[in-house]
Image: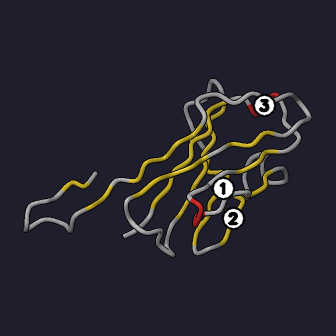
Amino acid sequence: LTSLCPPAGPSPTSSIYVYTQREVYGTVGSHVTLSCSFWSSEWISEDISITWHFQAEGSRDSISIFHYAKGQPYIDDVGSFKERMEWVGNPHRKDGSIVIHNLDYTDNGTFTCDVKNPP
């Protein structure tokens, strides 16, 4: 779980493990919860950040659609998710989940949850 660097290098680091569902299905017009849980051997820092990215099916690019930082959720003001997203996570319970409401065909793609727990 811990990788130690040589004395002259940076301080030791610990891994954080992030878990999501492999596939999530929903019907047009309904809502879906995108679960993101994580585990770390370290305490949960006040500087923890959680970012959700979306890569549309058939696209090479991904966009940031949600960010949690400094204890506050921020829905990114891009794409079609900004009016349909709800933060349901709680970092102190190691949960970074979101809900997407009013699903559309254009929501097909890959969603990625990225968690950082500095330092």
Q: Which mark, by number, is residue 88?
A: none
* Other-residue count near label 3 (Cα within 10 Å), few / some / many at <14 / 14–19 / ≥20: few
Q: What's the amino acid at mark 3?
A: Thr
Q: Earlier in the sequence, mark 2 or mark 3?
A: 2
Q: Which residue is mark 1?
A: 66
Are circles 1 and 3 on residues that touch, CB within 8 Å? no
- Relative to 45, say whether 14 is above or below: above
CA separation in Å, label 2 and label 1: 6 Å
Front position in the image: 117 or 8: 117
Between disc 2 and disc 1, whose residue precedes?
Answer: 1
| Quarter assignment of residue 24 | top right
Task: Give the label on residue 74, or none.
Answer: 2
Which residue sits at x=69%, y=42%? 34
Marks 1 and 3, the one that precedes in the sequence: 1
Above or below residue 50? Residue 37 is: above
Q: Spot the residue most to the right.
A: 29
Which amino acid lies under the numbered mark 1 shown in the image of this protein? Phe
Number of numbered markers: 3
Rendered residue at 74%/43% (across/down): 33
- Judged from the image, the secondary structure of the residue bearing numbered disc 1 is strand
- Is residue 69 or residue 76 the one in the foreground? 69
Task: Give left or right: position of 52 versus 3.
Answer: right
Residues at marks 1 and 3, CA–CA distance in whole angstroms:
17 Å
Do labels 2 and 1 touch, CB within 8 Å? yes
From the top left corner, tell me how far across and down residue 23 is, in percent.
Answer: 64, 28
Judge depth for marks 2 and 3 and give the one in front. 2
**In this view of the protein, which residue sits in the foreground, 15 or 80?**
15
Q: On the image, numbered disc 3 is attached to which residue?
A: 106
